[in-house]
């Protein structure tokens, strides 16, 4: 039960961040080029994503030994977690600009508005398709990694699905990017969680037997969290935040 709760929360938070970024693109296309184009691109991306994930998942789970899979996925998720945590630390310390969904939304709308439509709106369609597909693959990777492709894949998938549905529902009601979502806080938390899970799975895949099994993730996360907070305190004030809203 403890493993499933940790996996669920990690997948939920990670998927929420990616869903907000995908929603920003879909809304920008919908409000600028039309909802038919926006939704058609999003649906096409989801179809491609489902087929790719289904094929890849079945292949991996059928042919890759469990311990090797845990080692590889652990290293990959550790790298992803460190990347997220590093950027979150830099933003919290003021060395990197916060990701601004309102600014991204405005820039995307301005870019799309300048392109002239001729026949099928390929620009809007491609923009919506690409945005949903890229963020969707990141959600799928987080689910696969958090669940380690095994018995915990169900709570990971459930957490991600609930997050995506909630963000989509909020976007439908508000018709605007969810700029009030504390994205850097979420990325900070998810960075710690993914880094901790990556450490756990990579070590387990290498033959380490953790005391308490998945409960060991909690002290690992505590160590990473303390280290990240110390890094923020050390780096804060060294330089002004950079302009722009990169990931």
Image (cartoon, rainbow, N blue to C red):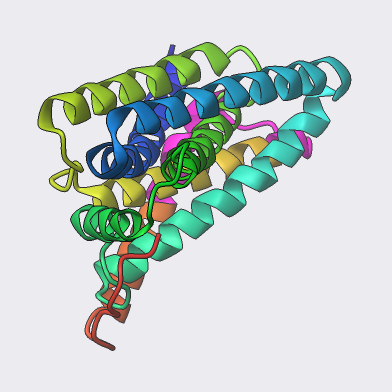
Give the percent coordinates (x, y) of residue 15: 40, 33
Tell me the quarter of the image containing the N terminus: top left
Q: At x 42% / y 49%, what residue is drawn?
A: 191
Q: Main secondary structure of the magenta part?
A: helix
Q: Splitting the image into 4 quarters, where does residue 177 fall?
A: top left
Q: Residue at (85%, 25%) from the top-left corner? A: 64
State the image quarter where residue 12 is shown. Answer: top left
Q: Relative to the observer, which residue lies in front, 194 or 95?
A: 95
Residue extending farthest front? 119
Residue 45, relative to residue 243: is it above or below? above
- 80 up-or-down from 151: above or below: below
- Across and down, in percent, residue 239 comes to 27, 88
- Left or right: 140 with respect to 183? right
Tell me what residue is drawn at x 39 percent, y 43 percent.
190
User: In the rendered image, is residue 152 in sight?
Assistant: no
- Span highlighted in magenta in the image: 204-223
Location of residue 225 with respect to 55 vertically, above or below: below
Describe residue 3's horizontal placement relative to residue 242 as left or right: right
């Amino acid at each position: 039960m403890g493993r499933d709760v940790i996996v669920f929360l990690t997948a939920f938070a990670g998927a929420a961040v990616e869903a907000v970024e995908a929603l920003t693109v879909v809304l920008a296309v919908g409000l600028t080029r039309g909802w038919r184009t926006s939704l058609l691109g999003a649906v096409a991306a989801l179809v491609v994503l489902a087929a790719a994930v289904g094929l890849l998942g079945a292949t991996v789970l059928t042919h890759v030994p469990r311990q090797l899979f845990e080692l590889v996925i652990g290293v990959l998720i550790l790298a992803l977690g460190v990347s997220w945590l590093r950027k979150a630390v830099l933003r919290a310390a003021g060395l990197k600009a916060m990701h601004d969904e309102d600014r991204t939304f405005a820039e995307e709308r301005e870019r799309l508005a300048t392109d002239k439509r001729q026949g099928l709106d390929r620009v809007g369609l491609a923009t919506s398709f690409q945005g949903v597909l890229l963020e969707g693959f990141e959600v799928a990777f987080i689910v696969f990694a958090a669940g380690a492709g095994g018995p915990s894949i169900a709570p990971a998938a459930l957490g991600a699905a609930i997050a995506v549905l909630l963000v989509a529902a909020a976007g439908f009601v508000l018709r605007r990017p969810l700029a009030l979502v504390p994205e850097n806080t979420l990325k900070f938390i998810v960075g710690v969680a993914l880094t901790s899970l990556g450490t756990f799975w990579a070590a387990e895949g290498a033959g380490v037997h953790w005391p308490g099994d998945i409960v060991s993730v909690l002290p690992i996360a505590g160590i990473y969290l303390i280290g990240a907070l110390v890094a923020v305190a050390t780096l804060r004030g060294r330089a002004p935040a950079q302009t722009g809203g990169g990931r």
